[in-house]
């Protein structure tokens, strides 16, 4: 392994996935260059099944920090990106791929910012009704937005604000709205003229108010959404005026 025979590839990946569900399995696979072999398999075989099981296995192995570094530095992100481009409508591949990217973003490892943000926005719109994909997308934007002003600009220009806003409008699950409100709060704090104009001209305020009204006992939603308003109220040049209901 890797073997050019697709069926053998799939069976091997399935067996490794079963093993990787145990911590000892993750350690064992990692120790034997498992991540590099999986990436080689993804590049060598253009099969939906191979891509699905490879992404699933990489997702399981991503709990090991060393594996995240290998994925981000040994062409792993490129292999995953190719799988996402080819299989944009495959929910399993997209979910596992976004989960891997989320882990990489959360520890600040470098990624090709525009390509990955653009891809995340694209698959979020394709799978707008899938809660887990909306959660992962907002988590990725959240972690990337914390790193730099340039990241915030990139997220906004690629459509990340609209993704977070629509996640609130389209999903009632608290977990989705928690991550979406956090993403909006971080982006609203930016000094970027582009981001301020985009928020002022969109329905972001309506989305935040909806989240606040529909989740009165959810502390995180209340905190994140309400924390965005002081920044948004500062957009005086765009005529933003928020009137207290008290």
Image (cartoon, rainbow, N blue to C red):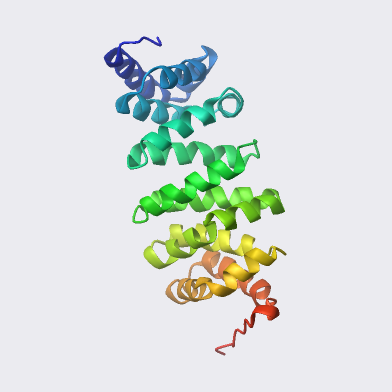
Residue 97 place in picture, x, y as percent: 45, 37
Q: Which residue is drawn at 45% across and 52% down?
A: 135
Residue 205 lies, in percent from the top left, at 53, 75
Give the residue displayed 54% in from the left and 53% down from the top. 158
| Residue found farthest to the left | 7
Quadrant of the frame with the N terminus: top left
As drawn, which residue projects farthest toward the bottom? 246
State left or right for residue 36 relative to residue 84: right
Quarter of the image holding residue 60? Answer: top left
x, y percentage for residue 65? 59, 29
Which picture quadrant has residue 234? bottom right
Can residue 223 be seen here? The reply is no
In this view, 31 is above or below 235: above
Name the side, left or right, on which 182 lies relative to 25. Answer: right
Q: Which one is in front, 112 or 109?
A: 112
- Can residue 173 be seen from the camera position used here? yes
User: Which of 100/16 is in front?
Assistant: 100
Residue 21 position, x and y percent, is 40, 27
Please count the marks in the image: 0
Above or below: residue 121 compared with residue 69: below
In-front residue for pair 73/122: 122
The residue drawn where x is 32% and y is 21% is 14
Q: In this view, does 223 lie above or below 116?
A: below
Q: Residue at x 30, y 26 (%)?
A: 49
Q: In which quarter of the image is residue 240?
A: bottom right
Task: Work out which quarter of the rendered image holds the C terminus and state it.
Answer: bottom right
């Amino acid at each position: 392994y890797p073997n050019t025979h697709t069926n053998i590839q799939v069976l091997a990946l399935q067996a490794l996935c079963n093993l990787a569900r145990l911590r000892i399995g993750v350690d064992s696979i990692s120790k034997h260059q498992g991540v590099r072999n999986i990436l080689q398999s993804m590049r060598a075989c253009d099969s939906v099944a191979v891509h699905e099981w490879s992404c699933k296995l990489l997702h399981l192995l991503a709990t090991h920090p060393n594996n995240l570094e290998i994925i981000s530095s040994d062409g792993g992100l490129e292999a995953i990106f190719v799988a996402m481009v080819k299989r944009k409508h495959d929910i399993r591949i997209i979910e596992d791929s976004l989960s891997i990217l989320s882990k990489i973003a959360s520890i600040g490892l470098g990624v090709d910012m525009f390509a990955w943000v653009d891809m995340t926005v694209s698959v979020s719109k394709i799978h707008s009704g899938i809660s887990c994909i909306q959660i992962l997308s907002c988590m990725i934007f959240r972690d990337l937005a914390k790193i730099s002003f340039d990241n915030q600009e990139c997220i906004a220009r690629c459509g990340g604000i609209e993704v977070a806003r629509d996640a609130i409008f389209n999903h009632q699950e608290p977990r989705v709205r928690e991550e979406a409100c956090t993403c909006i709060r971080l982006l609203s704090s930016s000094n970027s003229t582009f981001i301020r104009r985009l928020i002022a001209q969109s329905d972001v305020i309506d989305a935040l108010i909806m989240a606040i009204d529909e989740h009165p006992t959810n502390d995180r939603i209340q905190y994140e959404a309400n924390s965005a308003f002081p920044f948004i109220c500062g957009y005086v040049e765009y005529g933003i005026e928020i009137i207290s209901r008290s």
